Amino acid sequence: MGRLIKSNVYYRLPVVNNLFACIMKKAVFFDRDGTILSLVYDKNHGIVRTPLSPREVEFMPHIVSLCKKIKSKGYKLFILSNQPDIGLGRITQKTFNAIQNNLESYFAKYDIAFDGYYYCFHHPYAKIAPYKKMCVCRKPNPGLLFQAAKEHNIDLINSWMIGDGVNDVLAGHKAGCKTILIANNLESGHLSLATKHLKNTKPDYIVKKLKEILSII
Ligand SMILES: [Mg+2]
Ligand SMILES: [Zn+2]
């Protein structure tokens, strides 16, 4: 009797596996700053930084056509981003929400809805208690990718992580995704610096502009 049940289990396994493969979805995970939103040149400090107010929100060229293409190919769409600025006391939760609303309403105008937003608000040196933490979700850790995959049944092997930072490539690679590095500032040595930090981890593609991704995915 025991034998019979056992062979039954073996017989059924491939069927179950195929079923899971069918249900699982592929996804494209985008970083936010420097990937979806343009970085801001802060002339007071002579640096390029993330937008710190809704007025500073501008969108990267070709992001709309890229998101439309990705959706049309059956990918789910996510934003995965480190956002330590609340914890570091640079912006309030209210400002963060205003930036988020700005982002969502911009894409809504083009009939694009992201399937999820996954933000890590932690930072090892955060000034505000709940955010001061060594967490598993801050990229280059892959925690946000695993969380999104679990909640949306994502097949990470057939998914992409796209970002302008070394941390995006490392997190995507650790999660088993294909990765694209946007190195839009080649003149300033961005790429050579990125390659140095990546060590043995190679992005699958390095592009200068989002437009180039249209022919990759
Ligand atoms: Mg970025
Ligand atoms: Zn975190």
Image (cartoon, helix red, strand yellow):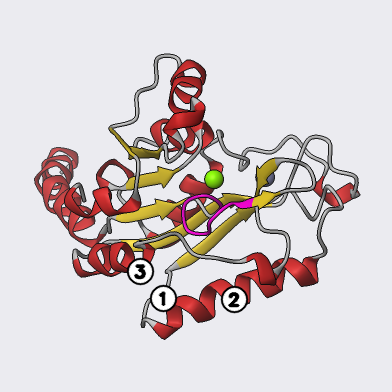
Q: Position of residue 187 (x, y in %)?
A: 45, 30
Q: Is residue 152 above or below residue 143?
A: below
What is the quadrant of residue 153 in the picture?
bottom left
Tag 1, which secondary structure?
Answer: loop
Residue drawn at x 27%, y 55% as measured from the top left: 26
Which residue in the structure is indicated by mark 2? 102
Residue assigned mark 3: 64
Q: Amino acid at mark 3?
A: Val
Are the two marked residues, 3 and 2, in contact with CB atoms closer than 8 angstroms?
Answer: no
Residue 176 lies in what quarter of the image?
top left
Residue sitting at x 74%, y 34%: 134
Label 2 element class = helix
Question: How far apart, in angstroms, are the residues tagged by discs 3 and 1?
Answer: 11 Å
Task: Give the total number of marks visible in the rendering.
Answer: 3
Instruction: Identify the residue under disc 1.
Output: 113
Camera-near label (3 vs 1) is 3
Q: Amino acid at mark 2?
A: Asn
Ligand 1 located in image quadrant: top right
Going 28% across and 54% down the picture, which residue do you hit?
211
Magenta-colored span:
33-40
Residue sitting nearer the eye, 18 or 161 = 161
Main secondary structure along the magenta-highlighted residues: loop
Residue 26, magenta (yes or no): no
Rounded to the nearest whole Å, what is the CA distance between mark 1 and mark 2? 13 Å
Decide which of tag 1 and tag 2 comes sooner along the chain.
2
Q: Is residue 113 left or right of residue 102?
A: left
Q: Judge left or right: residue 76 versus residue 9.
A: right
